[in-house]
Image: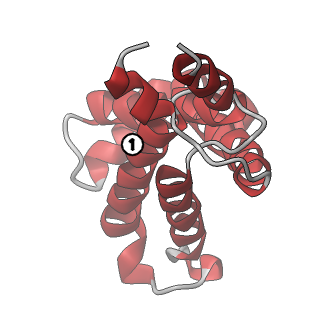
Amino acid sequence: MNTRLINLVATGKSWGPSALRVAVGVIFSAHGAQKLFGWFGGYGLEGTGQWMASIGLAPGYLMALLAGSAEFFGGLALILGLLVRPAAAVLAFTMLVAIFSAHIDNGLFMSNNGYEYGLALLAAAVSLAFSGAGRASLDALLGSQGSAH
């Protein structure tokens, strides 16, 4: 296996990241599905795009597609434990954009549409970007196969 790919999927033998990534992956995937498909009470690409344009993220449709794709597919990657480091890095960037474009002016607390939820997801994504997927993951399986050769 290519050395760069081995480094990309490298992960520790701990169970902790596995528990974190599955839960956070479900949350990200669901939020992405709201943006992309209108599932779970979301507004889909059109509605999300209009809102994003209204807060200055233009072109809104493209921004909704990018954010929704990062969340949906990044969340699926976390759930599967596949390419967790790059997926988590993209998700962390997505949360930074969300925090600073939509929530920072509202203070910390969610009750005021603040950034506490985004901050918690950002922290989880950064943690996974550093730790990798953990023991129960496709990354661990790929890494062990790559190092056996």
Q: Residue at x 35, y 31 (%)?
A: 66
Q: Position of residue 95 (x, y in %)?
A: 43, 57
Q: Is residue 57 above or below residue 71?
A: below
Please give left or right for residue 93 compared with residue 24 in the image.
left
Picture colour scheme: secondary structure
Q: Amino acid at mark 1?
A: Val
- The kind of secondary structure element at disc 1 is helix
Q: Is residue 87 above or below residue 23?
A: above
Q: Position of residue 125 (x, y in %)?
A: 53, 55
Q: Position of residue 6 (x, y in %)?
A: 44, 27
**Disc count in the image?**
1
Q: Specify the quadrant that holds the N terminus.
A: top left
Q: Residue at x 54, y 37 (%)?
A: 84
Q: Is residue 107 visible?
A: yes
- In this orientation, which residue lies closer to the viewer: 45 or 147? 147
Which of the 4 image quarters holds residue 20? bottom right
